[in-house]
Amino acid sequence: MSKNQYYSIPVKLGDAMHGKQLTQTRTRTAIHQNIKLMLKAKPLSYRFDPTFGCLANKYYAHTPAQKKSERLWREEIRESLQQNLRDLLQRYESRVSAKDVIVDLLEPKAKDKRQVVKLKVEMTGHLTLGSRERFHYPDSEIADDAQEALPLVIPVGAK
């Protein structure tokens, strides 16, 4: 494997067991795959490192405290997710130096059957390898689903 090639996630071990080469990918694609893995991993799900995983899963189906406005509660969620993602990038993705991490909670559309708040994440910075090129997540040049917003099941109510 060359210096700028990484194994693609998910790793298809069945292919390797049948003598096939594991799929390799470019640096930027590997970084995007790793960030997506961090976003979808639940905290405490990796027994060797309980800090790995996005806090977005912590808020799954939680409701705000009784004496707290929903708007303030959502703002606290947004801020804690931004900090969590900055920490995850710093700890687990050394190929990128993150400048900005932006988290938005998108309200469900009236026509949606499931009233689910979506989590939209954007990150900017630069690569720490080689020429220190600019980096942006999501990047439509890397993945077709780059503009996806992750579902975050937070009950919808009055603000």
Image (spheres, rainbow, N blue to C red):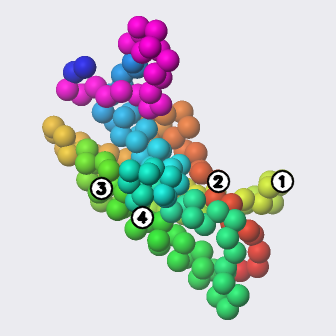
| Residue depth check, mark 2 versus mark 3: number of the one nearer the observer | 3
Residue at 42% over, 9% down: 20
Q: Which residue is mark 4?
A: 84
The image quadrant that residue 90 belongs to is bottom left
What is the crowding at mark 4: few (fewer than 14 residues within 10 Å), some, or many (at least 20)?
some
Q: Which residue is mark 3?
A: 91
- SS of the residue under disc 2: strand
| Residue depth check, mark 4 versus mark 1: number of the one nearer the observer | 4
Residue at 40% over, 68% down: 83
Q: Earlier in the sequence, mark 4 or mark 1?
A: 4
What is the crowding at mark 1: few (fewer than 14 residues within 10 Å), some, or many (at least 20)?
few
The image quadrant that residue 21 belongs to is top left
Q: Quick one: 139 or 116, which is closer to the camera? A: 116
Q: Earlier in the sequence, mark 1 or mark 2?
A: 1
Q: Is residue 148 left or right of residue 36?
A: right
The x and y percentages for residue 103 are 49, 62
Q: Which residue is mark 2?
A: 151
Residue at 38% over, 50% down: 48
Residues at discs 4 and 1 in contact (Cβ within 8 Å): no
The residue most toward the left is 130
